[in-house]
Image (tube, rainbow, N blue to C red):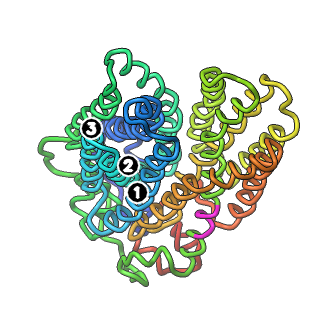
Amino acid sequence: MDKELAREASASPRTGTLAKQIEGAYQRIGVTGAHRQIVFMILLGVFFDALEQNAVGITGPVLRQAWGLGATEIGLLNTMTFTATALGRLATGLIVDKYGRRQMLVINLIIFAGGSLLCAVAPNYPILAAGRFVVGFGLGGEIAVAVIMMAEFFAAKHRGTAVGLINVTAAGLGNMLAPAFGILVFTLFDGPDKWRWVFGLLFIPALLVMFFRRYVPETPRFLASKGRIDEANLVITRLARNKLSGPINDPEQFITAVPDPVEAKSSGHWKDALRGKLLKRTVLLCIAVCMSYAAQISMLTLMPTILVSRGYAVNTSLWFTLIMQSGSLVGAATAAYLASRLPRKKVLTAAAILGCAAGLSMAFLANDIVLVVIFGALFNFAVIILNTTIWLFAPELYPTRTRGFGTSIILAAGSLSGGLFPLISGAVFDSSGLPGMFTTLAVLFCILAVVVQFPPETFGKPLEEDADAGSGDEEAAIYGH
């Protein structure tokens, strides 16, 4: 949209709540080239995050040979990463609500890159484990900020698809291409230290992303929530004029100060996400995401072992697992597509039912490898739809003043569940075999289907803003009705 069209789009009176004003401005400018540039820069970082999350799995066999590490020591590297990811998400959530989204996007990227470099030069196992902790801390914050920023840069019509693209890039493309990245690195470099190149090369793209993200602005929603209306209008003008850098003359007045504002009950304390109606939403989404992540990571962690126990070679088991993982890419893309067309709770309920059916089919009907692969792909398809939809649902449930921390709590709960529940699934498999394990995972989907019925539906609604948070009943507070 050129300058004249932007001025015309902003010509009508700005009335109503802050939520309505921002939503109206976003609807008028639509999705511009500047939006696409922001999406590209954010997703580029998310893609390399996904590669980094798979780095231990890629380098594990080489580390066992080079340093004589056992499976427990390699597993501990993943535990360090997952634990730090949860902590990074919580810490980032506290900071982004006070100081902004943009700065934390860059800071987390620096932390992630520094951790990668530390892993690449680690002289011993303790330093490598410390490097993985640093990496995990940066990764957790990076994903959390990416989810929040993608939600806050778009109107309701496009918001779900924008957030859904994060999981298309991470759980879909990133996880699927990670083995190919490892194969490429080990083809180019040889010797006992070739694993170092996996971490070292992951440091370089982070530098490029840091350069690109110089042009990612702060979100207008955060600026407006802090009373920085002029700055918010400047960013929206940049989006409308497709100009992320350089001077802007005569910024358009897309939004104004909220008329007759109702004072919010809180000015932005992090504990708001753990109070009143927001506490209920936090608890419900935490339960849902724990069920979803527990099922996903249990499947990814144990499926190769299950196939080996059935007599397949390790490499053959990995190839079958890779085919099943294709369901994740299709599931993420499907979730992104449905995000702009169907309500969140309907998508979550349908995917939970499908996941339960796939789990029970794995438990009782998968008598040959063809059925194992088919039901496994359906299982991954369903669980990634759930994860993606929860990612886009979570930031929609909180007002701007505490959106960062509320969303981060939910994502952190998922990380902890994904790190711990495979231990339970493994124990169930050892005692009860495939039927016991996948029946357990099917129960998780049933729990998820129940709890997602209780949060308020957010599909097609403007994000809640602080000035609206103290008015009327819950639905009116969210949507300005």
Q: Quadrant of the C terminus?
A: bottom right
The residue at the point 61 percent across, 39 percent down is 300
Give coordinates of residue 79: x percent, y percent.
Answer: 48, 52
Q: Which residue is mark 1?
A: 84
Give coordinates of residue 192: x percent, y percent.
Answer: 34, 25
Q: Which residue is mark 2?
A: 139
Q: SS class of the residue under badge 2?
A: helix
Give the amino acid at mark 1: Ala
Camera-side residue of 218 and 186? 186
Q: SS class of the residue under badge 1?
A: helix
Dot 1 or dot 3, earlier in sequence:
1
**Magenta stretch: includes residue 75:** no
Dot 1 or dot 2, earlier in sequence:
1
Q: CA distance from mark 1 to mark 2?
A: 9 Å
Give the amino acid at mark 2: Leu
Q: Are marks 1 and 3 in contact (CB under 8 Å)?
A: no
Which mark is drawn over residue 206?
Answer: 3
**Residue 59 vertical position relative to residue 224 in the rendered view, above or below:** above
Secondary structure of the magenta portion, mostly?
Answer: helix
**Residue 65 vertical position relative to residue 297 in the rendered view, above or below:** above
Q: Are marks 1 and 2 in contact (CB under 8 Å)?
A: yes
Residue span colored magenta? 283-287
**Which is closer to the viewer, label 1 or label 2?**
1
**Which is closer to the viewer, label 1 or label 3?**
1
Q: CA distance from mark 2 to mark 3?
A: 12 Å
For the question of whether residue 187 can be seen, the reply is yes
Camera-side residue of 444 and 255? 444
